[in-house]
Amino acid sequence: MTTPEPSKDLYLRVRAGFVLQGTTLQTWCRQNGTHSSNAQRALIGSWDGPKARELRSRVIKAAHIEEIRP
């Protein structure tokens, strides 16, 4: 799977993916030692370095958004 480009839409899709699993992005961040603001910035693209891209990839995979088409 190719990692989608960061955007506000991606952020909203990731949040929806967690809600469909009965949890939240914030809960995932807490459980994985990540600040939710860093995850948000990585998903919308305001933080886009190597660490942000790695975090974005992990969050997208955990959200299972490949089933949620834009």
Image: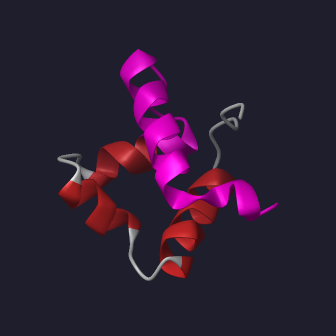
| Screen quadrant of the C terminus | bottom right
> Is 55 above or below relative to 20?
above
Q: Residue furthest right?
A: 70
Residue at screen point 40% across, 35% down: 55
The stretch drawn in magenta includes residue 61 = yes
Q: Is residue 61 left or right of residue 38?
A: right
Q: Which residues are magenta?
A: 42-70
Residue at screen point 56% across, 56% down: 11
Instruction: Give the image location of residue 60, x and y in percent.
Output: 54, 48
Q: Choose top left, top right, bottom left or bottom right for residue 27.
A: bottom left
Residue at screen point 20% across, 59% down: 30
| Screen quadrant of the N terminus | top right
Instruction: Give the image location of residue 46, x and y in percent.
Output: 49, 35
Residue at screen point 74% across, 62% down: 67
Q: Main secondary structure of the magenta part?
A: helix
Q: Is residue 51 left or right of residue 45?
A: left
Residue 22 or residue 47, whichever sits in front: 22
For the rendered model, the colour scheme is secondary structure
Residue 31 or residue 11, whichever sits in front: 31
Instruction: Give the image location of residue 17, x and y in percent.
Output: 57, 68
Q: Residue furthest top?
A: 50
> Is 45 above or below relative to 70?
above
Instruction: Give the mark count.
Output: 0
Q: Is residue 50 left or right of residue 16?
A: left
> Is 45 above or below relative to 17?
above
Q: Choose top left, top right, bottom left or bottom right for residue 7.
A: top right
The stretch drawn in magenta includes residue 28 = no
Instruction: Give the image location of residue 24, x and y in percent.
Output: 39, 72
